[in-house]
Amino acid sequence: MDEKKFQEIVQFAIQKEIEAVDFYTRASQVVKYSGTKDLFIDFAKQEQGHRKLLEDLDLGKVVRAKIEKIPNLKISDYLVDTDFRPDISYADILRIAMKREEHSIKLYNDLKPLNGDETLTKLFNFLIQEETKHKYSLEKIYDDEVLK
């Protein structure tokens, strides 16, 4: 296993988490209702937690990680990309967030077969699992609050 390649992938994933923190922080600043603001602040904190998880990640954790089957509601599969703008609605923020997670999952799935190393494959599976958890949470909220 190439330790350098492992660290490069982890650093890339950390950068994606930093971008997610920025997105949710911006989202919390534009929404109108305090409950929604709190929701996005909580998402930003979760992404910060994921960043910390990745920063503390080592090869042993990846090898021992148990990959769970996460449900896929497939809601984001049928949504179009939306731009973030100052007057954005709550539903549109959720749509953007779901699509961001969907794109991350696709990226990691596309990169996974290119490495040919079992440990790196496990790392990608771990990253896919984490992004899938985020996507599922967002899709549940969207289903419960927007599509109801």
Image (tube, rainbow, N blue to C red):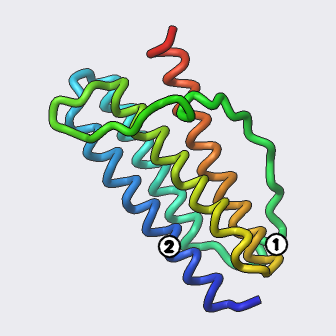
Q: Is residue 6 left or right of residue 116?
A: left
**Residue at (51, 8) in percent of width and height:** 148
Identify whether 147 is placed above or below 36: above
Residue picked out by circle 2 = 12
Three-letter residue code for mark 2: Phe
Q: Residues within 10 Å of mark 2 (few under 14, many from 20)?
A: few
Q: Is residue 39 left or right of residue 124?
A: left
Residue picked out by circle 1 = 63
| Image quadrant assignment for residue 35 | top left
Q: State which mark lies toward you, 1 or 2.
A: 2
**Residue at (43, 68) in percent of width and height:** 15
Number of marks present in the image shown: 2
Q: Nearer the viewer, residue 115 or 67?
A: 115
Residue 14 position, x and y percent, is 48, 68
Q: Say whether disc 1 or disc 2 marks the residue closer to the N-terminus.
A: 2
Q: Nearer the viewer, residue 13 or 102?
A: 102
Residue 147 position, x and y percent, is 49, 13
| Image quadrant assignment for residue 7 | bottom right
**Residue at (54, 58) in percent of width and height:** 50
Three-letter residue code for mark 1: Val
| Image quadrant assignment for residue 62 | bottom right
